[in-house]
Amino acid sequence: MRYPVTIVATLIGFLLCLYNSTGYDPHNFVFFMFSVPAWFADMIMDIHNVNVYFMYVLTVASYALLGYICDWAIARTSGKRRSYD
C-alpha cells in the first residue's frame, strides 16, 4: 500500500509547526486552530507550562496518524471495488 495522504498530512503538520516556530504566528492563532493535541493540552492544563517541542512532535504525529487512517480507508474501499469487478 502506498501512503500519499500520510506523506502530505505529515508535511502539513510539519509546516504548521515550522510556521509557528518562525514567529509569524505571534499569538499562536494558527497553531491552536489546526493542532489537535494543542486543543486537548489547553483543556487539561495551562498551555504555558507545556513543552513547545513536545507539542510540535505530537502535532506532526497526529497529522501522520490522520493521514494513515485516510490511506487505510482509501485502500480498503478501492479493494472492495476491485473485488466486485
Image (spheres, grey):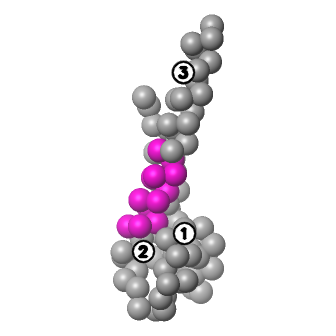
The answer to whether the residue labelled 1 contacts the one labelled 3, judged by CB atoms less than 8 Å apart, is no
- The quadrant the C terminus occupies is top right
Do labels 2 and 3 touch, CB within 8 Å?
no
Q: How far across and how far down the image is residue 4, in percent?
A: 49, 38
Residue 13 seen by the camera: yes
Against 14, residue 74 (above or below) is above
Of labels 1 and 3, the one closer to you? 3
Q: Is residue 18 visible?
A: no
Q: Are marks 1 and 2 in contact (CB under 8 Å)?
A: yes
Q: Secondary structure at mark 1?
A: loop
Q: Mark 2 or mark 3, which has the lower sequence index? A: 2
| Relative to 43, 60 lies left or right | left
Please name the amino acid that badge 1 sits on.
Ser
Mark 1, Cα crowd under 10 Å, few <14 / some 14-19 / many 20+, is many
Tell me the residue at 59%/86% (across/down).
Answer: 27
Give the amino acid type for the residue marked by disc 2 in the picture.
Met
> Mark 3 highlights which residue?
79
The residue pinned by badge 2 equals 55
Mark 3 element type: helix
| Residue at figure coordinates x 52%, y 29% from the top left | 75
- Dot 1 or dot 3: first in sequence order is 1
**Neighbourhood count class around disc 3 (C-alpha, 10 Å): few under 14, some 14–19, many 20 upward:** few
Estimate the x, y position of residue 42 in percent, counting from the top left: 53, 83
Kind of residue indicated by mark 3: Gly
For the N terminus, the image quarter is top left
- Quarter of the figure with residue 35: bottom right
The magenta span reads 57-68
Q: Position of residue 72 (x, y in %)?
A: 50, 37
Main secondary structure type of the part rendered in magenta: helix
Q: Secondary structure at mark 2?
A: helix
- Mark 2 Cα shell of 10 Å, populated few (<14), some (14-19), many (≥20): some
Question: Which residue is under mark 1?
Answer: 35
